[in-house]
Amino acid sequence: MGLIWTHVLRRLGARQVIATDLLGWRLDWAKRFGASAVVDASKEDSVEAVKELTGGEMKTGKGKADAPKLTITQSVEDWREINSGRLNPQMAFMSGKIKVSGDMSLAMKLGSIMGS
């Protein structure tokens, strides 16, 4: 799922997308999907590396975002079905399998980026 979001964030105009992983082949794919930098967490402290790459501007936290502009909720099973092409995202939304709240213009952009 992370590779998809790497691609989506770059298409939405993110200035910097940093991928971290323990597996080299995933990092190679992250570069192909548009990561501006990758960190091999099996060889270095990923938090410190990301702090360095962001000039100390990185913020971390647990839980929900304070004020998200868009929230999309769906089951992992439905996410897999959509990504495999077995479930049409628009039909999933219309049938209530995907719930969207917030800025619908962002949701529309996401749909065009994801190829739906």
Image (cartoon, rainbow, N blue to C red):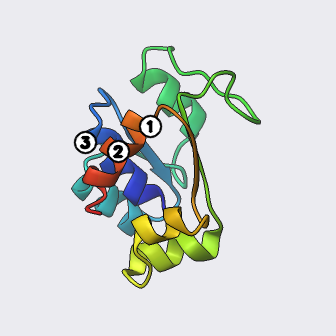
Q: Residues within 10 Å of mark 2 (few under 14, many from 20)?
A: few
- Which residue position holds label 1? 104
Q: Nearer the viewer, mark 3 or mark 1?
A: 1
Mark 3: secondary structure: helix
84 relative to 70 in the view: left or right: left
Q: CA distance from mark 2 to mark 3?
A: 13 Å
At label 2, the amino acid type is Met
Q: Is residue 74 above or below residue 15?
A: below
Viewer-proximal residue, 36 or 90?
90
84 relative to 1 in the view: left or right: left
Q: In x, y percent, where is residue 102?
A: 55, 33
Viewer-proximal residue, 110 or 105?
105
The numbered mark at residue 108 is 2
At label 3, the amino acid type is Arg
Q: CA distance from mark 3 to mark 1?
A: 17 Å
Viewer-proximal residue, 46 or 111?
111
Quadrant (top left/top right/bottom left/bottom right) for the C terminus:
bottom left
Q: Name which residue lies at 47% across and 65% down.
A: 23
Q: CA distance from mark 1 to mark 2?
A: 6 Å
* Residue sticking out furthest to the bottom: 86
Q: Residues within 10 Å of mark 1 (few under 14, many from 20)?
A: few
Q: Earlier in the sequence, mark 2 or mark 3?
A: 3
Q: Name which residue lies at 36% across and 80% down.
A: 85
Viewer-proximal residue, 51 or 100?
100
* Residue sticking out furthest to the front: 94
Mark 2: secondary structure: helix
Q: In this orientation, does residue 83 appear?
A: yes
Q: Earlier in the sequence, mark 3 or mark 1?
A: 3
Q: In x, y percent, where is residue 104?
A: 44, 37
- Determine contact: label 1, label 2, CB under 8 Å: yes
